[in-house]
């Protein structure tokens, strides 16, 4: 077992005993078998000394128990790594950034405190999963949809705090957060926004309260333990439909993205879309690459291939939710706008009216219908998992072109074959920008993982050279990513760490999270 840095075996044992006195012996886990369950199943550091492993775990059942645990952690300087359901796969699972941390596992706190289908929100505890919330809404016949991520076994708490995304119009999960309750490192409980008003009637209806809006400080951070979160939901729509727009040529992407951006910002097109390239996917399937590799086929050659095979260079499935007459009009309007691109073609897709009976075996787009699913696991090749490289890039065609050539060149310079099956063209998870989700394969093979890590590190640097930064990263790369957010000699990180030292002077909460290290452990920064 790896102890937390600077903590003696006897202090560690004393702390675990005190934790047990608070939560009960059965909710403190320190046997190797139990602790192994908190390791990252997709660790890029498998079988290496540097794998981020916890020392133990403690699972409280309520806010008062958390307050007592925090007090003990302060006394013994035990780092606590908070998780909700710990399913943050591709970004570290339930493993900590600092080996030896004790996992503060909140999955026992799984109460759904309110679901309101008149104002469309929910108030939940950390251990509530998307499946739990979905079933609760179904069982109570409430008129709201949730927005699960892919896959849907994690929690609204963990995914929203990590600023994850789903597929429906509520796709930007942190943007849907309204009101939090937080235990600070000194044990004090705060409520944000309108929740600071003791008799508040609008904690989940109005985000900002009075004075500075601090909720963002508790996302992707180590400033507090969030114990309740309000999230906005979508009223159950009457219908859903989708359709595909395709354009034939490379440069068509310029007016295509301009039109897309206009339609998204005008709220005509909503939800999450993925840019597709049937032509580049075909090129990759023939042993080429989605990326533009130096010395690879030119644009003219690729377009010629497209003509021969009847494949468009670019396409995108658009989704619409709402009353049938509204979504029909939205699709017609989108088609009208994209028709300005010569050669644009359109294909009507699925059309569903709600309520609708869905069987497990139906081939429906589960997540876009607000139904949590694990089916994404069936799509991921390789078997041993992946870690995600997820830079934000401008919502502009020129940026997509630059990505394809810059990352192609980076791979060529590294002498590594790009693993195209894991490369995605841009997603629209967030407004005004694109995000790439590039899955680096993980193996139970130290050399292969080293190669993946070398490529990952280089891509972080190449991205930064082009002005692109990751929206979220694996625990093993938090320092690497934080290192490139360096404007004005790391002024933002220095502010984060000044705040950290002020509100968590013993540095007990999730040290190293998002590259934020408390003073006591700052030498751990990679
Ligand atoms: P999920 O429940 O979706 O599986 P996790 O529990 O894995 O998500 O949480 C993802 C990350 O978010 C954690 O590694 C942690 O850094 C942060 N986090 C999760 N829950 C909390 C919380 N209640 N308070 C503070 N940070 C949290």
Image (spheres, rainbow, N blue to C red):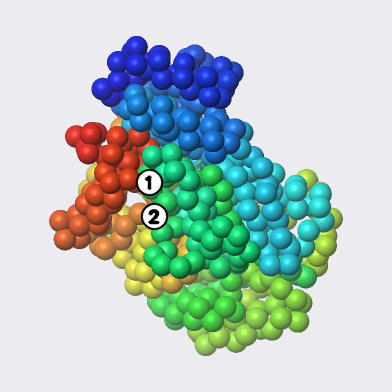
Q: What is the quadrant of the N terminus in the image?
A: top left
Q: Residues within 10 Å of mark 2 (few under 14, many from 20)?
A: some
Spatial CA distance of label 1 from label 2 is 7 Å
**Relative to 441, 268 lies left or right:** right
Say if mark 1 contacts mark 2, CB within 8 Å: yes
Q: Which mark is residue 223?
A: 1
Q: Nearer the viewer, residue 374 or 381?
A: 374
**Relative to 128, 472 lies left or right:** left
Q: Position of residue 174 (x, y in %)?
A: 50, 58
Q: What is the quadrant of the C terminus in the image?
A: top left
Q: Mark 1 or mark 2: which comes first in sequence?
A: 2
Residue drawn at (34%, 24%) of the image: 76
> Residue 326 lies in what quarter of the image?
bottom right
Give the residue at the far front of this rendering. 198
Q: Is residue 442 above or below residue 2?
A: below
Residue 233 in sight here: no
According to the image, label 2 marks what residue? 217
Q: Is residue 94 above or below residue 278?
A: above
Q: Position of residue 443 (x, y in %)?
A: 43, 30
Q: Tag 2, which secondary structure?
A: helix
């Amino acid at each position: 077992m790896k102890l937390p840095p600077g903590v003696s075996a006897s202090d560690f044992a004393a702390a675990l005993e005190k934790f047990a006195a608070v939560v009960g012996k059965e909710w403190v886990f320190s046997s190797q078998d139990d602790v192994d369950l908190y390791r990252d199943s997709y660790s890029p550091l498998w079988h290496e000394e540097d794998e981020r492993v916890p020392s133990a775990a403690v699972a409280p059942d309520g806010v008062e128990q958390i307050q007592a645990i925090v007090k003990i952690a302060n006394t013994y300087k035990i780092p606590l790594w908070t998780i909700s359901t710990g399913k943050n796969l591709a970004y570290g699972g339930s493993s900590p950034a600092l080996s030896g941390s004790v996992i503060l596992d909140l999955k026992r706190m799984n109460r759904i405190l309110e679901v309101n289908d008149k104002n469309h929100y929910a108030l939940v505890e950390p251990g509530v999963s998307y499946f739990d919330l979905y079933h609760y809404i179904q069982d109570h016949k409430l008129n709201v949809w949730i927005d699960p991520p892919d896959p849907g076994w994690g929690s609204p708490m963990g995914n929203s705090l990590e600023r994850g995304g789903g597929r429906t119009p509520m796709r930007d999960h942190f943007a849907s957060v309204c009101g939090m309750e937080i235990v600070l490192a000194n044990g004090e409980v705060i409520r944000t926004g309108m929740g600071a008003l003791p008799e508040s009637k609008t904690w989940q209806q109005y985000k900002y309260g009075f004075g500075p809006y601090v909720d963002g400080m508790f996302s992707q951070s180590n400033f507090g333990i969030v114990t309740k979160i309000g999230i906005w939901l979508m009223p159950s729509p009457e219908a859903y439909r989708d359709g595909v727009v395709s354009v034939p040529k490379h440069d068509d992407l310029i007016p295509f993205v301009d039109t897309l951006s206009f339609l998204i910002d005008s709220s005509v097109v909503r939800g999450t879309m993925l840019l597709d390239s049937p032509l580049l996917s075909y090129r990759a399937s023939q042993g080429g690459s989605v990326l533009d590799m130096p010395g690879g086929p030119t644009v003219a050659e690729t377009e010629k291939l497209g003509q021969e095979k009847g494949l468009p260079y670019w396409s995108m499935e658009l989704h619409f939710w709402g009353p049938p007459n509204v979504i029909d009009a939205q699709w017609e309007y989108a088609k009208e706008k994209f028709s300005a691109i010569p050669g644009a073609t359109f294909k009507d897709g699925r059309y569903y009216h709600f309520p609708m009976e869905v069987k497990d075996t139906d081939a429906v787009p589960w997540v876009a219908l607000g139904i949590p699913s694990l089916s994404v696991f069936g799509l991921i090749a390789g078997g041993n998992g992946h870690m995600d490289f997820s830079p934000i890039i401008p919502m502009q065609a020129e940026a997509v072109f630059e990505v394809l050539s810059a990352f192609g060149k980076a791979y060529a310079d590294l002498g590594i074959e790009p693993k195209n099956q894991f490369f995605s063209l841009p997603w629209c998870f967030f407004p005004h920008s694109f995000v790439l989700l590039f899955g680096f394969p993980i193996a139970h093979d130290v050399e292969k993982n080293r190669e993946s890590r070398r490529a990952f590190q280089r891509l972080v640097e190449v991205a930064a050279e082009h002005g692109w930064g990751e929206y979220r990263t694996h625990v093993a790369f938090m320092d690497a990513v934080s290192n490139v957010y360096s404007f004005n000699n790391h002024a933002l990180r220095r502010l984060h760490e000044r705040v950290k030292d002020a509100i968590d002077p013993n540095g007990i909460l999730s040290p190293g999270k998002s590259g934020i290290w408390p003073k006591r452990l700052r030498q751990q920064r990679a």
